[in-house]
Amino acid sequence: MGVDLGDLVVKNKITLSSLSGKIIAVDAFNILYQFLASIRQQDGMPLSDSKGNITAHLSGLFYRTAKLLENGIKPVFVFDGEPSELKKRTHEERSAAKIAAEEKWKKALEEERLEDARKYAQATSRLTAEMVEESKELLDAMGIPCVQAPGEGEAQASEMVKEGLAYAVASQDYDVLLFGAQRLVRNLSITGKRKVPRQNRTIMIEPEEIVLEETLKALGINQEQLITIGILVGTDFNIGVKRVGPKTALAIVKEHKTFDDAIKYVVQKYGYTFEVEPEEVLKIFKEPRCNKNIEKPRWKRINAEAIDEILVKRHEFSPERVSSVVRTLEERLKETSAQSKLESWF
């Protein structure tokens, strides 16, 4: 879900090659949900093996992450830990939305409205503990490091950027900016042509980089004011104020400079009662629960046999296609090692 800051941030179009040699902390849950939502059959059924095991997340992880590696990008996948108590409402809302979407999906299938069926099906995606563990297993086989966050994965990824362990966070959500990540990269795993729903045309989705300092300067605000905007609009930890969108929230924080003054103004102006104390949400973003001073990520050599075991033997992926990708990656890593010090990769 995330906070709605799309109309405010400064977006810069980039290419995958421009990120070559850079460490990117990937918000793992965010990207896995992308794969589960988008990698589906025409009727909306998720990609699965003959035994009915969903494999969309593994397909996305393998083939699209391989593309990042081929472009010289060094991903580190950061996984969510125990969510904040304040996020329970968000989880409940998402569960209710999935149930409603499933009903619409079934009805659309019965009426043979395949495009609608696929759209509703995308909103039913569920990420299980088994999927998470198998994703970690595949990433390890690909030689890609994983980091387990104690709380929010995006908070831990942001901390890695702040500590200089990563160049940017890769996520579709703008929340990482509230957590203080200096750079956010969006569309990293969905780059390419995409069909516009209900229209006979496609659009090109390109990676984009958002630099926190550049956005703050353009808006004329500081980091705490950006968090305040998020709280007024609504985050995963609180419900936003009705009739207050991003642009209205920006105007409020620019007129009422401090957090307390902005909150007091909203309460008086809109007669609004926050369901949780705004100060609690502010603290989540300013003092997130994450591991400090974690070890520098290290990449390992590709384990072709382990990849084959997971994808081909266990889930019936094409052996030819998997082998082709593995060979390409091994050749790419050899080239990289020859051009730079071996220690930069292993």
Image (cartoon, grey):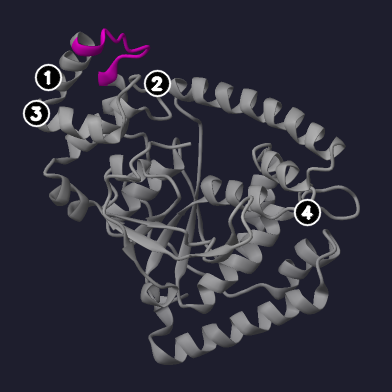
Circle nearer the viewer, 4 or 1: 4
Circle nearer the viewer, 1 or 3: 3
Q: Earlier in the sequence, mark 4 or mark 2?
A: 4
In the rendered structure, the answer to whether residue 171 lies left or right of residue 323 reads: left
Q: Earlier in the sequence, mark 3 or mark 2?
A: 2
Q: CA distance from mark 4 to mark 2?
A: 35 Å
Residue beneath disc 1: 261
**Percent coordinates x, y for residue 262 in the rendering:** 16, 22
Q: Earlier in the sequence, mark 4 or mark 1?
A: 4
Residue beneath disc 2: 239
Task: Identify the residue at image location x=66%, y=48%.
Answer: 36
Q: Secondary structure at mark 3?
A: helix
User: What's the residue type where badge 2 is placed?
Assistant: Ile
Q: Does residue 206 appear in this view? A: yes
User: What's the residue type where badge 3 is placed?
Assistant: Glu
Q: Residue furthest right?
A: 50
User: What's the residue type where badge 4 is placed?
Assistant: Gln
Q: CA distance from mark 4 to mark 1?
A: 51 Å
**Percent coordinates x, y for residue 296 in the rendering:** 38, 61
Task: Identify the residue at image location x=51%, y=31%.
Answer: 82
Residue beneath disc 4: 42
In the rendered structure, the answer to whether residue 192 lies left or right of residue 22 reads: right
Circle nearer the viewer, 3 or 2: 3
Residue beneath disc 3: 255
Task: Identify the residue at image location x=37%, y=51%.
Answer: 294
Is 327 rendered above or below residue 6?
below
The range drawn in magenta is: 269-279
Q: CA distance from mark 3 to mark 2?
A: 22 Å
Dominant SS type (magenta): loop
Residue nearest the viewer, comparing 330 with 125 = 125
Is 200 rendered above or below residue 18?
above
Image label count = 4
